[in-house]
């Protein structure tokens, strides 16, 4: 039997109408939608402000939809109704989902197959930090670089949403971690066992080389641009460069796709050279269209591993700030300021 939607509730969603400043985001209100066959209606409890949305508002995310649309890459919430073909006993369950767009809303329609159960006792805000950012960190560390105990890794942006989880997972795996961040975050990184390097002081590559004269076993680089060459050169024999963004071009003009294509070409060329190092580009969404079931199985397994790591204390959620959905402009400005540690969240 299908659950009934409470028609007294109101849908509130944030619309990105075009290339606008944060204040240009629009609040749209309407009727809460009913789930269709195979869908669940999720009442959002927490969603995140990621770097993807920062690029999207500039029209610079590689494959974003045409304007206008509702941003929001991931969410955690409670199932309020189920569509045909979905067990009604899912109603009331807390779930997490990667949706790429659409999560900046009070209620979100999600394919039931994409809804991942969140264990009892985990705060929805804490769980939210592990969905997009945590899965990205986990898959880069364990599925791409396959980091092992005793190895040394370099994490750029070690205080950021992904970086703050990545350094914790790497330390839990027994790796030595060098992390770039501005000086204000260095003490917190040291407390986590991370060796900090000030990315604003210049000569980052030389200072990392001084810390790891033989090179590092993995570099996690979200910056892209010319600096990715230094990331490649810092690898030890057998090392892996995992590139997962082009943050250096966030405010650039011109084609949004060209920086990504240039980066992919550079990585392909390095892999074609006769050497003992490897490079890859990571996109957490990649492969969903071609292998949806495999994508879902991997997401469920990796989120389960992250929730277990949270339970063990291997990961502590880093929440920079929480804002109500209506204050999305202020939340986005803070996320873009480059001053925060961890993730900025939106709540109902």
Image: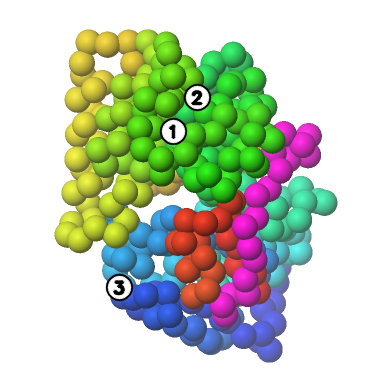
Mark 2 falls on what kind of element? strand
Viewer-proximal residue, 240 or 32? Answer: 240
The residue carrying mark 3 is: 19
Q: Is residue 230 left or right of residue 305?
A: left
User: In percent of the image, x 58 and y 40: which residue is there?
Assistant: 186
Q: Position of residue 192 (x, y in %)?
A: 67, 34
| Res 56 → quadrant | bottom left
User: In percent of the image, x 52 and y 53: which residue is there?
Assistant: 98
| Sequence-wise first label, 2 or 3 | 3
Q: Which residues are magenta?
A: 309-328
User: In percent of the image, x 64 and y 66: which residue is there?
Assistant: 322
The residue carrying mark 1 is: 220
Indicate the quadrant containing the N terminus: top left, top right, bottom left or bottom right.
bottom right
| Sequence-wise first label, 3 or 1 | 3
Indicate the quadrant containing the C terminus: top left, top right, bottom left or bottom right.
bottom right
Viewer-proximal residue, 81 or 307? Answer: 307
| Sequence-wise first label, 2 or 1 | 2
- The answer to whether the residues at label 2 and label 1 have Cβ atoms under 8 Å apart is yes
* Mark 2–mark 1 distance (CA, rounded to whole Å): 8 Å
The residue carrying mark 2 is: 153
Q: Position of residue 236 (x, y in %)?
A: 39, 14
* Mark 3–mark 1 distance (CA, rounded to whole Å): 29 Å
The reply to whether the magenta stretch includes residue 316 is: yes
Mark 1 falls on what kind of element? strand
Q: Position of residue 10 (x, y in %)?
A: 62, 85
């Amino acid at each position: 039997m299908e659950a009934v939607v409470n028609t007294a509730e109101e849908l509130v969603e944030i619309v990105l109408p075009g290339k606008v400043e944060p204040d240009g985001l629009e609040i749209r209100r309407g009727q809460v939608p009913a789930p269709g066959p195979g869908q669940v209606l999720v009442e959002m409890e927490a969603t995140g402000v990621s770097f993807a949305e920062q690029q999207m508002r500039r029209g610079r995310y590689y494959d974003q939809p045409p304007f206008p649309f509702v941003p929001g890459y991931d969410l955690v919430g409670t199932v309020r109704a189920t569509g045909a073909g979905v067990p009604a006993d899912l109603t009331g369950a807390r779930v997490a989902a990667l949706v790429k767009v659409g999560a900046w809303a009070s209620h979100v329609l999600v394919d039931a197959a994409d809804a991942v159960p969140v264990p009892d006792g985990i705060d929805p805000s804490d769980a939210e930090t592990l969905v997009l950012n945590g899965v990205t960190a986990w898959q880069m560390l364990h599925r791409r670089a396959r980091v092992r105990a005793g190895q040394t890794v370099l994490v750029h942006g070690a205080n950021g949403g992904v970086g703050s989880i990545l350094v914790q997972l790497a330390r839990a795996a027994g790796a030595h971690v060098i992390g770039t961040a501005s000086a204000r975050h260095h003490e917190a990184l040291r407390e986590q066992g991370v060796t900090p390097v000030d990315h604003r002081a210049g000569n980052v590559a030389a200072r990392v080389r001084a810390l790891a004269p033989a090179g590092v076993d993995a570099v996690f680089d979200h910056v892209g641009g010319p600096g990715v060459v230094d990331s490649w050169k810092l690898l030890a024999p057998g090392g892996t460069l995992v590139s997962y963004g082009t943050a250096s071009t966030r405010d650039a003009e011109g084609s949004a796709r060209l920086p990504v294509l240039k980066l992919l070409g550079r990585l392909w060329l390095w892999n074609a050279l006769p050497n003992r190092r490897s490079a890859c580009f990571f996109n957490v969404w990649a492969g969903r269209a071609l292998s949806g079931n495999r994508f879902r199985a991997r997401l469920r397994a990796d989120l389960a591993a992250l929730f277990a790591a949270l339970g063990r204390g291997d990961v502590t959620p880093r929440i920079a700030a929480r804002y109500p959905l209506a204050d999305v402009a202020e939340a986005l400005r803070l996320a873009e300021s480059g001053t925060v540690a961890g993730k900025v969240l939106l709540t109902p």
